[in-house]
Amino acid sequence: MNDLTIDVRSLRKSFGTRRVVDGLTLQVERGEICGFLGANGSGKTTTIRLLCGLLVPDGGEGTCLGLDIRRDAAQIRRQTGYMTQKFSYYEDLTVRENLDLVAGVYEMDDGAAAVDDIIARMGLASYETQLAGHLSGGWKQRLALAACVLHRPKLLLLDEPTAGVDAKARREFWDLIHDLAGEGLTVLVSTHYMDEAERCNRIVYLAEGRIVVQGSSDEVVQRAALVIFETMGEGIDDAARRIRRMPGVEAAAVFGHALRVAGGDRVALQKAVDAFPTFEWREAEPRLEDVFIHQLAYGETTP
Amino acid sequence: MNGFSLRRLAALLRKEWIQVRRDPMTLRMIIALPIMQLFLFGYAINGNPKHLPTGLLLAEPSKYERTIVTALQNTGYYDVKLFSSEAEAERAIATGGALFVINFPANFDRSVDRGETPSVLVDADGTDPTAIGSATAALSAVVSGLNRDLPPIRQAQPAQQPFQFVVHARYNPEQLTVLNVVPGLICIVLTMSTLVITALSITRERERGTMENLIAMPVRPIEIMLAKIVPYIFIGYVQVVLILAISAVVFGLPIRGSLTLLMLTLGLFIASNLALGLTFSVVSTNQMQAQQLAQFTLLPSFLLSGFTFPFQGMPVWAQWIGELLPMTHSIRIVRSLLLKGNGFAAIAPELWPIALVTVASIAMAVWFYRETLD
């Protein structure tokens, strides 16, 4: 008896001649928070839609919640909460009316009580009579999360849930996600934010519809085997511009007062920084963000 | 996901109803459109249809009758057919089989020869005054055409008419155009509001991105569609009552037939529009396309249904197109019920084409509706 909530093999999906998902194999354990990373157009949204039956795969097979993703799409949808990238509840309905609709459509026997509960839990009480269209971005996301966990799903699919939301709201949002995961809910969440990726149990990095690297945040950083040099001082902006063109340098970026230079080849990178002797270089620990930028630039290289 | 669920439908219906109520523009349109149209179209629309079906009733054989009928045919307005009984004539004019019945009295020839100027009764279907207006006007030329055939002694007195036509406009004796327009207008307004609004309904969900969420939830296509249709059936009835009330009070529209029967048949007509609108909404990818499809139906419904121009005035191919439109049949039903006071038997032949379009549309909408985003 395996405890995999998501278990899919070789999923493929094309739109026209473009292969958006190209042989994706993914396993997510029950209760896990799995982060989906990757550039725009790398197939994150399409994969999520394939998993909840909104799209029919061209090829591949597998199960979600033990149900066949082709044959049992309708049953998967019943037990899945899907939060779309774009706010997709009704802006001309109030917070409570939107939640009432969801409770009704899922035929919940304790609909009214469940709506009361979720409003209290998500801190939506002071907004419940407001039109969804009048909510700010952060509160809209919170309403959407409330609506997609209302029917007590076993799997939560979140497609860039915090895009365009301020840091405080994002932090609170992630606290809620961890609460839900603690109750046994499996969460698959796509994001572009590093701090969010670091809060996932596992990161899956997608490029061109395929998984390039996956593992815990630490494992991903380790496996990328990046070398980082860091320096400070006058003229780092100018140095960043010039060092970027040197062989062996894959990324060079200024963070505040520090210039970070990254590359996969230690010898070549050492040579590059030696060409700037006026600066005092020291080696630094690679961070997830360095790996992410490295992957964005060299998405095709497999670890 | 099990089949149809009333609970899910109820939840969706509540949502649709709230959305309708919160859309002040649509609400204003629903009230303002019929009133505006009623007053705009309340004024004369001209047409000059020819070859109107005409029945002939002869009390006895007549030597002048053939000349008069030939002259009537030659005006181009009358296609004359002999009726054998008054009952047949009555039925024909009630069901629209004939727009005129020409009734030659007994002793017609003798009265003409004696210079008594006998009367030929022309029963006209007055429900559409524009359809019969020009034809009625052409009658006077026919009268003088008989002069050549008269005996010499009568030809010496040309000042005197040999006979006269007495036109009796049935159903709409005052020949009020508005009485013809109102029944048509009920159908036009219903089509304009219900067809266009439902045509936009599903594409709007798609454009706002709410469709993705809706189909991610366990709802059946038929539930979504019924939820979209039901509020507008109610709204359609509000419009019908509004138009009938204004027409009765302001224009003195008679309601001669059964009001219950009228409401029931209009329900079918409203359903046909909503079903057609939904089909447009399902096959379109955006609101613009849906709008255009709706216009594509509205235009012939205006022009070829007998609303703007008399149906008999159209070429045969246009009449065939007209027969395909629910509007054409619905206008006939409403005129028949309101002005002629007919019962179910008279309107039954007009009901099945509307039902056919409705069923075909719903089948198409369900066929083309996709439960995935593919």
Image (cartoon, coloured by chain):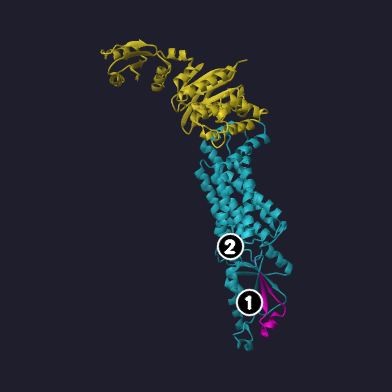
Chain colours: A yellow, B cyan
Part of the protein shown in magenta: B99-123
Q: Which mark is residue A148?
A: none
| Left/right of residue B336 with respect to residue A89 in the rendered view | right
Q: Residue at (60%, 57%) from the top-left corner?
A: B184
Q: Circle 2 sits on which residue? A: B310
Query: Considering the numbered disc 1 on the image, is that residue within a helix, a strand or a loop?
Result: helix
Which quarter of the rendered picture does the N terminus of chain A lie within?
A: top right
| Kind of residue sitting beneath label 1 | Ile
| Kind of residue sitting beneath label 2 | Pro
- The quadrant in which residue B280 appears is top right
Q: Position of residue B352 (x, y in %)?
A: 67, 52
Relative depth, front residue between A102 and A275 = A102
The correct choice, above or below, for A239 with respect to B197 in the image is above
Crowding near the residue tagged with mark 1, few <14, some 14–19, many ≥20 C-alpha atoms within 10 Å:
some
Q: Earlier in the sequence, mark 1 or mark 2?
A: 1
Q: Circle 1 sits on which residue? A: B68
Relative depth, front residue between A10 and A284 = A284
Q: Nearer the viewer, mark 1 or mark 2?
A: 2
Q: Read off the chain for label 1.
A: B
